[in-house]
Amino acid sequence: MAFFKKKASCHTPHNDAPSHARKVVLVGNPNVGKSVLFNALTGAYVTVSNYPGTSVEVSRGSATIDGEQFQIMDTPGMYSILPITEEERVAREILLNESPDVVVHVLDARNLERMLTMTLQLIDAQLPVVLVVNIMDEAERMGLTIDIPLLQEKLGIPVIGAATAKKRGLAEIRRAIATYTGKTHAVFGYSRRLEADIDSVTTLIHGSYPISRKSLALLLLQRDDEVTALVKEREGEGYTAIASQVKEKCFERRESFHMDLSMERKGIVTGLLADVFRFPAQRRVTFNERLSRWAVRPLTGVPLLLVVLYFGLYKFVGDFGAGTLVDFLEKGLFEDHFNPWITNLTKAVIPWEVIQELFVGEYGIITLGLRYAVGIILPIVATFFLFFSILEDSGYFPRLALLVDRIFKKIGLTGRAVIPMVLGFGCDTMATMVTRTLETVRERVIATLLLALAIPCSAQLGVILALLSKAPGALLVWGACLLLIFLIIGFLAARIMPGETPMFYMELPPMRLPQLSNILTKTYTRMQWYFMEILPLFILASVLLWVGKITHFFEVAVEALSPVMAVMGLPKEVAVAFIFGFFRRDYGAAGLYDLQTKGILDPRQLTVAAVTLTLFIPCVAQFLIMKKERGMKVAMGIGLFVSGLAFGSGWLLNKFLLVTGLL
């Protein structure tokens, strides 16, 4: 029987590990290296899916260690086995429902004293724990000394010092997983009074549970609702006596139980670390630590962010990706060589002109869809994901979250939302999925709205950067408009939507030089996912546009949008880019790229079109994910609001530019 009842779900995890494979569950605080260890153990054989009844993603993979098959699970970050957030709740459900053969607790060597408290809880629960003291390289660089063998002796479980990002300790971890039986561990006693309280509850518990009665009693005394419901179900009539005893003890210590338990655990950890953890007489402050401090302080963090955005987004993604690489692929390869060759070949093979148009016409699958996907979108996406992976592997994102937390609170979000927001510059569809990591429904809806409205995906961003950089001031106007709308709509949404902004806390991984292997793996995986998503949609869009052309529906749609374009001071040809943008916003940006190369738009019109298209209705893929994550009502509401605001903003911007004479 499962530890907790779960809601039914049609999206259940699965993996290719055989049914007899031993289970290994990775647990620990966020940003301690669990995912790096998971990837090192499983390689590319990974399944990522929602945990049943939740929107929290869980990774599962298989590994062969010493000739034996293992199923590896990477849990969401947790700080305690008493859950507060949905991620912690899911992590505990996995820990207790999956009956793991080995529980690998990964912690940060630099924060050993704080994180060992959860190790005590896992040991108290009599789970088969292997402790991985990770990020040892950074601890050593700071002058910290950790006696791993002595800590292992005190805990009575395998303890491995590791730096998984640098492959250090992986062999020892695999050996510990393969050989550990989980039958021995140390026993830690609390004060006489607390032990008496625990015993008064454990003596009344008679059912069978996946954790020790001591751990169960502590969770009952901490008023864990799920554990209480489970005990009530399994103990039957005996639950009345348990509930009465718990109520009595909670009343007796109503003002101090949680604090007393926390202080006693802290005292045990302090005793464990005696002679194990040593600080240097004069601790060295490394350059990475200085850089970390600069990144979170507004006075230095904002200029650092501007430098990162200038060289990363503008120069690397905009100039190199959307400029140099796109010119080479789209113009040099497709327009000059591939398209003429495939057009002649298709016309020679297919005698019917209407079928020729499907493949190599104005909206042909090959000459338009494939050219957009490979010649324009792919190089931009590749450079963005490479840039994103470098920042991610360096540990910069958590510091960026701290830097923007104060501003984000004004728009109903916390610094945690910086991850989906930044990821939205890669792909808004993926970023909308990541909003599920935010703590409240209110945060998720606001973040989804802002992603749909003012965050351009990498392909769209790259094309627009390349287009507007050729017109002095245009890029500045475009960026200022988007930032202003982002802040205004976020501020209004935070005031209109009920609820409070939650507290924000985030574990800071070390700042370090990114590892080339990690960067390439992450970039390849994201590019593969993105390209497999966009290519079918681009092909479908080309087919629909071809159908629209031969049925003359496309011309009707362009004519219908012409008055709207005229109100914004745009030629009717720009309607084509908006029709493209309905399928994907990056597809629309590519259409705008075509119009600009034909010389149809002046700088003012190009800027108005770029702002309106960036704000325009979410693409089909993003809309479907919005519907899945937030429901049809919210998705439709966001879609209609964003579309109206986009055209209204375009009209206002055009009037402003005409009156002021800018551009």
Image (cartoon, rainbow, N blue to C red):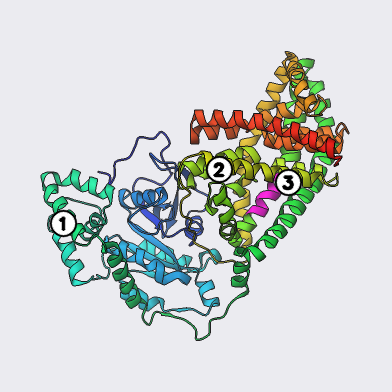
Q: Quadrant of the N terminus?
A: top left
Most common secondary structure along the magenta stretch: helix
**Residue 26 coordinates in the image, percent (x, y):** 41, 57
Camera-side mark, 2 or 1:
1
Q: Which residue is mark 2?
A: 447
Left or right relative to 338: residue 302: left
As shown in the figure, which amino acid type bears the numbered disc 3? Ala
Graded by Cα atoms within 10 Å as few (under 14), some (14 to 19) or many (20 or more), the crowding at tag 2 reads: many
Q: Which residue is mark 1?
A: 248
- Magenta region, residue range: 379-388
Q: Per the image, is 119 magenta?
A: no
Q: Earlier in the sequence, mark 1 or mark 3?
A: 1
Q: In this view of the protein, which residue sits in the foreground, 330 or 632?
A: 632
**Residue 628 coordinates in the image, percent (x, y):** 49, 33
Q: Secondary structure at mark 2?
A: helix
Q: Secondary structure at mark 3?
A: helix
Mark 1 and mark 3: span between their CA atoms? Answer: 61 Å
As shown in the figure, which amino acid type bears the numbered disc 1? Glu
As shown in the figure, which amino acid type bears the numbered disc 2? Ala
Q: Earlier in the sequence, mark 2 or mark 1?
A: 1
Q: Secondary structure at mark 1?
A: helix
Instruction: Residue 480: give its label.
Output: 3
Q: Where 569 falls versus 14 (above or below)?
A: above
Mark 3 and mark 2: span between their CA atoms? Answer: 20 Å
Q: Give the residue at x 81% y 48%.
A: 324
Q: Give the residue at x 37% y 61%.
A: 178
